[in-house]
Image: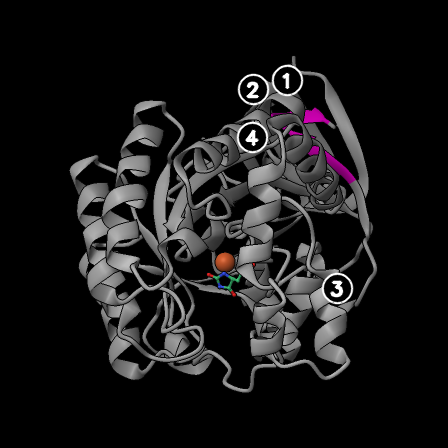
Amino acid sequence: QMPQKSTVFVDLSAATMAACGAPYGLISNAAIAVIDGLIDWVGPVADLPESYNSLPKASLGGRLVTPGLIDCHTHIVHGGDRAVEFEMRLNGATYEEVARAGGGIASTVKATRAASEAQLLADALLRVDVLIAEGVTAIEVKSGYGLDTDTELRMLRVARAIMDNRPLIVKTTFLGAHATPSEYAGRADAYIDEVCIPTLRAAHTEGLVDAVDGFCEGIAFQPSQIARVFDVARELGLPVKLHAEQLSNLGGAKLAAQYGALSADHIEYLDQDGVIALANAGTTAVILPGAFYTLRETQAPPIDVLRKHGVPMALATDINPGSSPLNSLLLTLNMGCTLFRMTPEEALRGVTQNAARALGLTDMGTIAAGMRADLAVWDIKHPAELAYRIGFNPLHSRIFSGGIS
Ligand SMILES: O=C(O)CC[C@@H]1NC(=O)NC1=O
Ligand SMILES: [Fe+3]
C-alpha cells in the first residue's frame, strides 16, 4: 500500500464532479488539502483556511485535476486471447463455425483453467498498467472464466493480488453465472445448483467477493436462473449487479432492480419500463460501448430515456478477450460520446462519481472532503478534451492516497 500523504496541492483547476452548480463541478485556481491520504478541503485557493499553512505545498503547474478514473466493469483477469477467432470472423466464419472450432467464452475458459495464479496475475498486470497510465485509480474485476470452483476462486484471488502489486483499489465480483461450461452443456440449471452457487458460498467464506453478477441473455442464463444466484447473494449479504439486455430484452434489468442491484450493465435493449424500474430502485446504468463496437451491434442503449428519468449513468471498458478487448478508459469516453451521444460531462461523470456508485463506493469518485485523495492530473485546458481526443493520453501524473504515483 502506498504511504499516505499530507499535502496541500495548489496551482490547479479542479473538475470536482461534485454537484456544485458549475459544469464538471469546476473550481478554477483551486487548492486541495490532503491529510493522511484523504481530501480534507477543496475550494478556491483564496479561501484556503490558514490552518493548512503548516502542511507542505505541492504545485501542479496550473494543470486540470479530476478524480482518479474508475473502471467499474472489467473481466481483466483471464487466460489466453481470442485474436484467432477475431481473424476467423473477418475471414467470413460464422459465430457457429467459430464456436464449433472451440472459440467463444469456452476457449477463454479452457485457457484460464490451464493458467496458474502467477500467470493470470502477470497477464492481468500488463493490462492493469495500461489503465493506471491513463489515470485509473480503481477498477472492478469479475470472475467468470473458470466456471468450476477451483478456477473461479483462483481468478478472484488473482483479482485481490492486483492490489498487493499496484497502487490501485480493486473491487471483486463473482460471475459464476457467466456461461454454462461444456461439461454441463444443456444442463444450465444443474450447473447453477451444483457449481455456481456452492462456489459463490466458498468464495464468500474466503472473503473474495464484494458483489455478485450474472449474464442474463438467451445465450447465457434466464431471469429465473439468475434469481436463484441472487437469492444466495442476498442471503450472504452481498450486493448484486447484472449483465442485462445486451442482445435482447429478457427483463434482466427489471430483475436487477427487484434485488436493489448496484448496477445493470450493457442495457442496449432496455425499454422505458426497464428504465423506470432502474430509476425507482436507484440502480446505476453501466454503459459499455466496447462490446457494442466490437460486436458491431446496431441497437444503442436508451441514453435519452435514462437521462429523462434521472438514472445515473456509468461508463466502463468491459475489457474482456472476446466481446470487448478494449484496454483504454479514455477511448471508452470518446466511444460513449460518439457512438451513444453521451455528453463529455456525462461521460467523465460515468468514469468517476457514477462509476463509484455502480460499485457501491462512497469514498471516491469526486474531489470532496472525506473522499480518498485519488486524483488524476492532466495536461489539458478543458475537461471535454478527455472524451474528445482518440488515442491520445494527456495524463501528467496520478495521485493515489495523496502520493504522486
Ligand atoms: O466473449 C467473451 O469472452 C465474454 C462476452 C461478454 N460476457 C458477457 O457477459 N457479455 C459479453 O459480451
Ligand atoms: Fe462484461
* Callout 3 secondary element: helix
* Callout 4 secondary element: helix
- Residue 5 is tagged as 1
Q: Please report whichever mark, 4 or 2, sits nearer to the chain's N-terminal start.
A: 2
Q: Which residue is mark 4?
A: 158
Q: Which residue is mark 3?
A: 84
Query: Do we see residue 30 in this rendering?
Result: no
Q: CA distance from mark 4 to mark 1?
A: 28 Å
Q: CA distance from mark 4 to mark 2?
A: 31 Å
Give the left or right position of residue 200, taking residue 395 as reference. Answer: left
Q: Quadrant of residue 392?
A: bottom right
Residue 211 lies within the magenta run: no
Residue at the (60%, 21%) spot, across then down? 164
Residue at the (27%, 67%) spot, across then down? 222
Residue span colored magenta: 397-404
Q: Look at discs 4 and 2 and give the one toward the viewer.
A: 4
Q: Please report whichever mark, 2 or 3, sits nearer to the chain's N-terminal start.
A: 2
Q: Residues within 10 Å of mark 4 (few under 14, many from 20)?
A: many
Q: Is residue 394 above or below residue 83?
A: above
Q: Total label count?
A: 4
The amino acid type, in three-letter code, at marker 4 is: Val
Residue at the (62%, 45%) spot, across then down? 111
Residue 402 lies within the magenta run: yes
- Residue 35 is tagged as 2
